[in-house]
Amino acid sequence: MIIQWKWNDPEHIDAHRQDFSEPPERVMDWLVEEHLSSISPAHRQGWVHASYEYPRFAGVSGLREVPPDGSASFWGYRNKRTIPSHLCEGEKSLTREICLWGWWDSPCFVVHTLYPGAKAPREIHDPDLTLQEIAGAIEFWRVHAIVVEKGDWSESHH
């Protein structure tokens, strides 16, 4: 059986579209063919949050390690976002890794987000962050930030 997929929020992928080397729809079709279709129907349930190795460069990753002292990073709101993110300015790096985050709504796979780069925990201000995830999210985001350019963020959300 061929697995169908859809964007949960088609506008959300637009925030990552420019980071891909090829259309994210093509990357998603590859993920379905190479990874999701091998999951047995009995196990197609719940959330999927995983990193995959794409056969060529998937695009550029906006996730970067930063010193924990805050000297190279700051907090701000990315465009079209309502929660603050840990940010830094700089260059994004080429990557083959892809992070997929979505869930099964049998027989369809619903994509919450897809971006070039490694799997990362929910951001610490994410309202869907569970109590069990807080410590790991704080530890991760204390030393990681999302690369932005001037104009891609603000000090308050709009």
Image: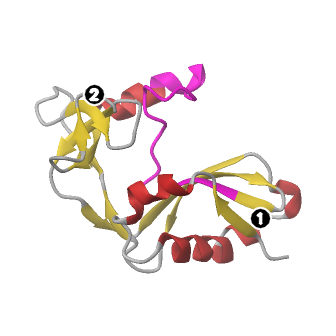
The dot on residue 78 is: none
Can you say which quadrant of the picture contains the N terminus?
bottom right
> Considering only order in the chain, which callout, 2 or 1, is on the residue closer to the N terminus?
1
Secondary structure state at the residue bearing disc 1 = loop
Q: Nearer the viewer, residue 13 or 50?
A: 13
Q: Which residues are magenta?
A: 110-135
Outermost top residue: 131
Can you say which quadrant of the picture contains the C terminus?
top left
Check contact, mark 1 vs mark 2: CB within 8 A: no
Magenta stretch: includes residue 121: yes
- Is residue 117 visible from the viewing direction of this image? no
Quickly name the residue at label 1. Answer: 39
Q: Is residue 85 above or below residue 24?
A: above
Magenta stretch: includes residue 104: no
Q: Mark 2, residues whose alpha carbon is within 10 Å: few (<14), some, or many (≥20)?
A: few
**Residue visible at 23% across and 35% down in the picture:** 154
Quickly name the residue at label 2. Answer: 156
Task: Name the residue type under label 1.
Answer: Ile
Determine whether, in the image, residue 158 is placed left or right of residue 45: left
Secondary structure state at the residue bearing disc 2 = loop
